[in-house]
Amino acid sequence: MPPMNAAKVEKVKDFKGTIGKLVSYAKPYYAKMIIGLSLMVISTVLCIYGPKLSGDVTTLLAEGIMLKYQGLGGIDFEKIGQMVLLIIGLYVVSAIMDYLVSFIYTDISVDVSYKLRRDVSAKIDRLPLKYFDGQSHGDVLSRVTNDVDTISNNLTNTVSQMLNSTVNIVGVLFMMFTISWKLTLISLLIIPLSGIVAAFIVKKTQKLYSAQQKYIGLVNGHVEEMFSGHMTVKTFNYEDKSISEFEKLNNQLYEVNYKSQFLSAIMMPVTGFIGNLSYVVVCLMGGMEVASGRMTIGEIQSFVTYVRRLNQPISQISQLMNTVQSMAAAAERVFDILGQEEEEKDCENPVKIYDENGEMTIQGNVTFENVRFGYDPEQIIIQDFSMYVEPGKDVAIVGPTGAGKTTLVKLLMRFYELNGGNIYIDFKNIKEYTRNDLRDIFGMVLQDAWLFEGTVMENLKFVKPDATDEEVYKACKMAHVDHFIRTLENGYDTLISEETSGISQGQKQLLTIARAFLSDPKILILDEATSSVDTRTEQLIQDSMEELRKGRTAFTIAHRLSTIRNADTIIVLDKGDVVEVGDHESLMAKNGFYARLYNSQFES
């Protein structure tokens, strides 16, 4: 077995609490569980009574043979035949009930898994962006898929088998006591040894299963990052380093997985060996009881059968404890997401942005009042930002990398909550709008062009599902992308995705800009919207943007300052503070920070 040097393992933090939460998820199915338990008890009773009848049949056969040998009678085949038919009937009814129990508990576990996955998916939509800033996308994906699957697969077997084993133990012990209380006590003396061994193994495996789920998430996270950035990985010859990191994580996963599986595998053989010791002792003691005439041969046969049946559920419960550990480790990671702090709730009486005819009533006033923000409350990056933007004005936000440009517009759309100050739209605090309505006000084009797998038409209608085809064509013409789309093999019905080959990054950007035209927003946010297009296309888009900006408030984030020379107002940020405000001509005349920033673009 490999040494556990590299992989650090952590125990499930709250085993009882996690299992309690899992049980609470099954609360709507308690009625089904009671029905299943009732059927299980009946099935077990019928099945357990079978060996007793089999022992009686053996006794009848033995006594009949002895009577025939002594010439005093013979074997009562009629009675034996009736008993055999009764035994077969008991087992058939028991098998049918076992099937029903399995069906009921499988249905419950599948429903619980469905509910968990649904709740996790809904929870992700309610989590603030700051949660994802500190999480690997692959790890989050692993919690939604692998961890929930682990719960689903284990829950199906664990619930029914655990209950079945418990009922079997109680029923078998009862039958054993009815046959011989002395032999039963002798058998029970060895059982605690199985419990001690099982408890020792469970204690060792608990933290291993927790680490196993953790490393599955890390491996998934690494693969997701390397796959999504495969072009960059190849460009900078990072393949060997990537493989090396994967091997490291994979080895750590292998180590904890190997050790947990090894310990789980020895659980059944060890407890089975201890059970066999009980079996041997019972056979010896039972033989003496029969020889002395205190027990019949049929009774000892039944008792030995019950001893074997008693060892099976005990070993099964021991094995199931490992499964429970794995399930608890996965459930804890799932409940960790479900327990995360959500976005602040929308106000109870929000401001309406649509009139009775469904027309948006927003004018486009934007006010920043003493805005203060930091992704980490201890490290404030926007100190005290205040500004008023009139409707229809074109505002450019410029500054060096890390100055807080993109952060400012994220705050405007309430992706993050402020540490201080307020932001108003039409003189109403943005917290007075629902998040859905607030974001309906904006049209946003990001530097990274995002497309999903679907047709060109479906990708464009993403922002406005009820848009007509004519509205889509018009938006594409304004974005100078209509001609390009019609040259594709199937035009607007061409299937594309984020990773589609044959479509350049610039063309993808044009499609996202067309989406912004289609959404017809009151306030535009353009975050390096033309960064991936050539100079000629950029000029065409700028001309179209001028038309789109008419009657709308626009915020443009730009690194290429030549693209925002015509902006009504230019806000110059540096380290989160506003250092200059004005139009291009006035800022250049000051020969200050903006002028140095602008001129630096043309320095050789």
Image: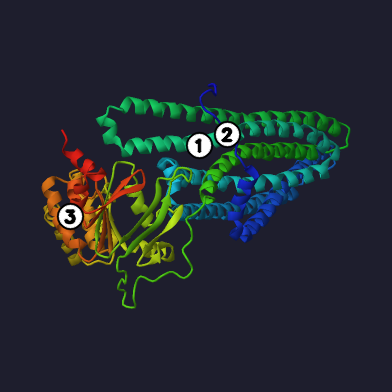
Q: Is residue 98 visible?
A: no
Give the labeled residue for mark 2.
Answer: 10
- Residue 214 marker: 1
Q: Earlier in the sequence, mark 2 or mark 1?
A: 2
Residues marked 2 and 1 touching at CB (< 8 Å) = yes
Q: CA distance from mark 1 to mark 3?
A: 52 Å
Q: What residue sits 62% from the left and 37% below the top? A: 319
Tell which of 88 and 147 is nearer to you. 147
Give the labeled residue for mark 3.
Answer: 566
The kind of residue tagged 2 is Glu
In the rendered view, would you say 59 is above or below 25? above
In the rendered view, would you say 406 is above or below 280? below
Q: Is residue 564 left or right of residue 341?
A: left
Image quadrant assignment for residue 534: top left
The kind of residue tagged 1 is Lys
In the rendered view, would you say 581 is above or below 135? below
